[in-house]
Amino acid sequence: MSDGRSGRTRRPPRPETGSAEGARRPRVALGVTGGIAAYKAAEIVRGLTRAGCDVHVLMTEHAQRFITPLTLQTLSGNRVLTDPWDLSQGADIQHITLTRGLDLFLIAPATANVLARMAHGLADDFLTTFHLAVTAPVVVAPAMNVWMWEHPATRANLEILKGRGVRVIDPGVGDLACGDEGVGRMAEPAAIVGEALALLKKKARAGLKAVASS
């Protein structure tokens, strides 16, 4: 949008996250898994950081084949976590340390494989281990082939996760990387960012009400 005087384009105001000026920035962990939609994680990181969030990215091994950790580290301003055994930043247990003060855990894209491992409580990489340690709200944005999305196992896994309070941002309909057309395309990054910010705002308001009533 133009300011009408200088002709320069102004950036839209940051969406509210429920935090007052000068308050702690909302802390978001973004899990990126190994699907073609992983490259869109850059747009999600950019959208969240522009909204004032402190974004920490976790990547699976396969995600790193689609987009580099350096890209997401540059956009987020934080080191990307990929290896639970990496002690280069100190002896802290990373998947526990990051959960402290976390406001939201967002996984986008979330592959059928990772959804299945989450549903059954597996902890065989950094992301799934981190998931079991998280007490903050969890949001997943699935992305997969239409047949995988409609498979009874995937549907059952999603129901298990929903039953535990995980919020699912349903995929859209469109052309898929495999050449098929149908449901399975990850929701657009702007929509995912909007959902995340809405949840952060709701969480912040609930926290303010709790403080006021104590």
Image (cartoon, rainbow, N blue to C red):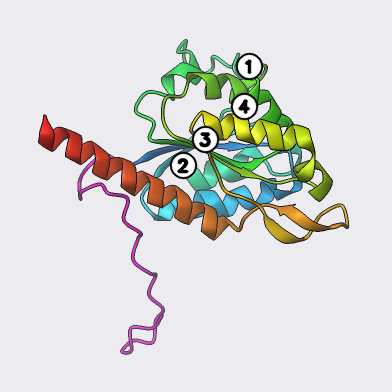
Closest to the camera, between mark 3 and mark 2, is 3
Q: Amino acid at mark 1?
A: Ala
Q: Which of pointers 4 and 2 lies earlier in the amino acid sequence?
A: 2
Is 71 left or right of 14, judged from the image as shown?
right
- Residue in view at x 70 percent, y 49 percent: 37
The residue labelled by disc 1 is: 123
The quadrant in which the C terminus is found is: top left
Disc marking residue 166: 3
Q: Vertically, is 109 above or below 122? A: below
Q: Is residue 80 visible?
A: no
Residue that extends furthest to the top in the rendered view of this protein: 91
Q: CA distance from mark 3 to mark 4?
A: 23 Å
Q: CA distance from mark 4 to mark 2?
A: 16 Å
Give neighbour class at mark 4: few <14, some 14-19, many 20+ (Cα, 10 Å). Answer: some
Q: Nearer the viewer, residue 121 or 130?
A: 121
**Which span of residues is magenta-colored?**
1-25
Give neighbour class at mark 1: few <14, some 14-19, many 20+ (Cα, 10 Å). Answer: some
